Amino acid sequence: MTSIGGVAPSGSSGAGELLRLMLDGTPRTRAELIKMTGLARSTVGARVDALLAAGLLTTSGEAASTGGRPPARLAFNPDAGVVIAADLGATHALVALTDLRGRVVAEKALRIDISAGPEPVLDRVARTARSLLSSAGHGREHLAGVGIGLPGPVEHSTGRPVLPPIMPGWDNYDVPGHLARAVGGPVLVDNDVNLMALGEHATVYPHVEQMIFVKVATGIGAGIISGGRLHRGAQGAAGDLGHVAALHGGDTPCTCGNVGCLEAVASGPAVVRALRERGVDAGDARGLVRLAKQGDLEAAAAIREAGREIGHVLATCVSLFNPSVIAVGGLVAQAAESLLAGIREVVYGRSLPLATGELQIVASRTGGHAGVIGAATMVVQHVLSAEQVEHHIAEAAAG
Amino acid sequence: MTSIGGVAPSGSSGAGELLRLMLDGTPRTRAELIKMTGLARSTVGARVDALLAAGLLTTSGEAASTGGRPPARLAFNPDAGVVIAADLGATHALVALTDLRGRVVAEKALRIDISAGPEPVLDRVARTARSLLSSAGHGREHLAGVGIGLPGPVEHSTGRPVLPPIMPGWDNYDVPGHLARAVGGPVLVDNDVNLMALGEHATVYPHVEQMIFVKVATGIGAGIISGGRLHRGAQGAAGDLGHVAALHGGDTPCTCGNVGCLEAVASGPAVVRALRERGVDAGDARGLVRLAKQGDLEAAAAIREAGREIGHVLATCVSLFNPSVIAVGGLVAQAAESLLAGIREVVYGRSLPLATGELQIVASRTGGHAGVIGAATMVVQHVLSAEQVEHHIAEAAAG
DNA sequence: ACCTTTTGTCCGGCCGTCAAGCAAAAGTAT
DNA sequence: ATACTTTTGCTTGACGGCCGGACAAAAGGT
C-alpha cells in the first residue's frame, strides 16, 4: 500500500470476510454480526462502515425493538454492480445481465453457429452484452465481470477451450482476452454443464456439499460439486458422461466414433430417432418434449427408457460419489416426470441403501436459465471473494 | 491467552503455517524460507526458534557456503512424536507405530474376528498399540495420535461406523472414545479404502489433485482424492464400487442380496470361484495370487478378466471424475500385471482421449501397508495442521 | 588480516484489534 | 412528559504481531 496515510478510519482489511457472511442474503444487525464473528464492536462497526461506503452493504429497515433503540438491519446489496453472463450452445446462445445475486435482470437469446469460430461468435456476444448494459443504463464502471459457458471442455484457469469436439477453431483460443477487450472486466470461462451445476448449487442447494447436475439435451454431461466446490477434474474433462458405455448401447454408433455411448441412446436426438423407428415423428428434441407434455404415451415411454439408461450410469456415479442431490436439467429434462421416473427407478433399485437413503433426484429448478445463472455465480464468487473485496475497498478509499 | 507475560520472544503464532512449508521433508535455510513466505527476517527467525524449541524442526547440516558463513539447513523433524496406526480387516489387523512422516517404525499383525464386536477387537488393538509404544521406549507424551481404518462406512467427523454390512455390533459405536481411553491421544477413524487413498496420495503422489485408489480384495472399493483432499461423500459412503452392476454380472448372486455386482464377479473370492469352475483350485485369494505369480496362465487369465470387469466400471469413473492417477491396491493387486492389463485394456479403449491423455493406471506402491500409512497420514495431517501446531507451541511456551 | 555471508539480538514504529467509555439516537415503560 | 433501555457513533489507550533497520557475533573464504 502506498503510505497515503489511511483516510479510512481503520479496519478496512478483513471486511471481505464479513461480507462473506452476508452473501446468503439474510439481513443481519450489527449485534448479530458481533456474535457470529466474535470480533469487537468497534471492529465490526469499522468494517460495516467500509462496506456501506463501498456500496456492498445497505441498511434495510429496522428489526423489532426489545425495549430500546431498534437495531438497524444490514443486507448485502446485490445492485452494487452488474454481471454479464452468457451460455453458448451449438446453435443458440443466451446472454444475460444479472445483479450480484445472480438474478437475471435482462436477457437476449441469439441464434449462433458455434462452428463459425470464436471471433464472429464472441463479437456477437460482446455486442449483445454492450447493448444490454447500455439499455439498462450501466456504464463499464458498474460491470463487475463477465462469465461465459461453452459447450466443451475448458481449462478454467486460462479460459481456453481444450480440444472441444463440436467447436472447430476454438481450440486453445484466448476467450477471456477477446471478451475483456470487447466488453471489459474480469472474464471467467467454463464448461456449460459445470456452470449449470454451479448455478443450481448456489441458488437452490447452497448448503449441500456433494451434488451432481446432469444435463440431458443434444449431449449428456454432468457437473460435479464436491465438498461444496466445483470438481473440474485433472484436464477439465470431468463429468463427461455422454460417452460412457450404456447398458443397452449395443453397437449404436455415436458421433464420437465409438459405439454404444450413453449419448447415442439417451440424448434428445437419440430419443427422437428411437421414436421415429416406432413410427412417431417428433421432429426434433423440442418437438419430443412438446409431445410428452401433451400426454403422448409413446413419447413419454421413450423418454422414460432414456431415463433408465441414464439411471444405470448414474447408479455407478452414486456409488462412487455418494451425492445428496442429483439435479437433472437440459432440454429433455423439461419432460421431467418421465425422465426422472426412469432415472429414479434404476438408481434407487441399483444402489446401496446407505447411499440412496438421503439422495434426492430432482428436476433442475433454474430451468433454461441454469447456464447463465451459473456463469453469473462464477463471476460473483470470484469478484466477491475476500481478497477481491479488500482490493475494491482499498481502491475506493484511495481514490 | 492468560496474560502470563509472554516468555516466548514474540511470533509464536503463525509458526504453524511456516511448518506446513517444511512438511514435504525438503531441508531449507532461513533465507529460503524468507523468500518463500515473504515475511521479514526477524519474523522468520522467531518462528523458526519456536519450532526448534518445540522439537518440530531440527538443524540438519549446513548448505554450501557462497563465500561467507554457511547457511544452516532446517528440516522437519519426523521424530517429534509417534503415531499409532491400525488397519482392520474382517479377519486380519495390522497395528503399526509410525513417525510423523507416516513411516512405519514397528508393526504387528493380528488375527481378529471383526464380527466379535467392537470391545474385544479394539481392546486387542489397544493392547498391541501399548506394547508397540513401550517396546520402542515411548511414553504417552510422545504419542501424537491414533488413526484407525475400518472395513465399512464411517462417519469421519464422529468416528462412528454407519450401518457397516460386515461388522455386526459396530453400528454407531464410539470408536474414538474407546481408543482414547485405552491408548490416548486424539483418535481419528475412517474407512479403510479412504485411508489407503490418503496414504498413497500423501506418500507417492503429493502434488496430484485428482486420483482414485481402487482396492481389490475380498471386497472392491475406491477412495477418492478430489482437489487434493479426500472426498468422503454425503454419508461417508463414497467409493463403494463393489456393488455397482458389472457389465457381465448377469444374475450372479452377491453377498449384498442383489445380483450382478462387480464384487460378485471380480473380487478375490469371485475369481477363485471362477477358476474352480475351470477345474483349478487356488484355495483362497492368497493362493490365487501365488498361482498367478508362479506363471499359471489360467490364474492370470482369470485375474485379467476380473480386471476387465473392473475396468468397465472404472471407465465410467474416469469419464465422471477425470483423475490423473488410478492406483490399484489390495490383495489381488499383488498380481498386478494381469489385473492392470485388464483394467487398462478397457479404460483406455472406452474413454475419451482428453480424459485418458494424462491418466496413469498403476499398482499401489505402498503395498500391504497402504492402510496403516494412510491412517498415520490422517493423524499427521490433523496434528500438524496450522491450528494444532500453534496450540502445541503455545502450551510448550506456557509450561 | 580482511572480506563476505549468515545468524542472533535488539529496538522503534506501524497497523489491526480489543476493551472501555461517553454521548447521541430512538425507541419503550410509567 | 420523564425515565429507562438499547443501539449506534465516536474516541482513546493498550496490546500484540510484524516490519525494517542496526549492530554484533559466528563461520567460512581470499
Image (cartoon, coloured by chain):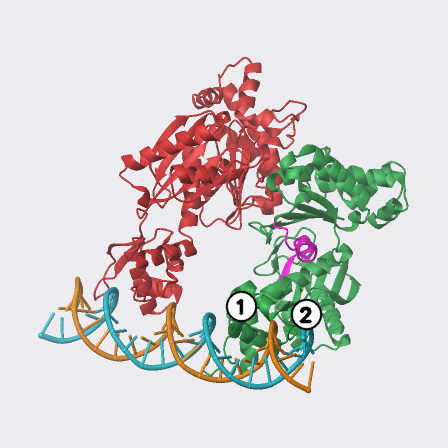
Chain colours: A green, B red, C cyan, D orange
| Figure quadrant of residue A169 | bottom right
Residue B18 coordinates in the image, percent (x, y): 38, 59
Report the front residue among A393 and B340: A393
Query: The disc labelled 2 sits on which kind of residue?
Result: Ala
In this image, C30 relative to B38: left or right?
A: right
- Pick the front one: B25 or B397: B397
* Sequence-first tag of 2 and 1: 2
Kind of residue sitting beneath label 1 = Glu
Q: Quadrant of the C terminus of chain A?
A: bottom right
Q: Which mark is residue A23?
A: none
Callout 2: SS: loop
The image quarter containing residue B386 is: bottom left
Q: Marks 1 and 2: in contact by CB < 8 Å?
A: no
The mark tally for this picture is 2
Instruction: Examine the structure image and report whether residue A197 is included in the region drawn in magenta.
Output: yes
Residue holding disc 2: A63
Callout 1: few (<14), some (14-19), or many (20+) C-alpha neighbours within 10 Å? some
Residue under the point 67% across and 50% down: A165
Q: Which mark is residue A387?
A: 1
> Residue visible at 65% across and 58% down?
A170
**Chain name for mark 1:** A
The Cα–Cα distance between marks 2 and 1, rounded to whole angstroms, is 31 Å
Q: Position of residue B75 (x, y in %)?
A: 31, 54
Per the image, label 1 sits on a secondary structure element best described as helix
The magenta segment? A188-209
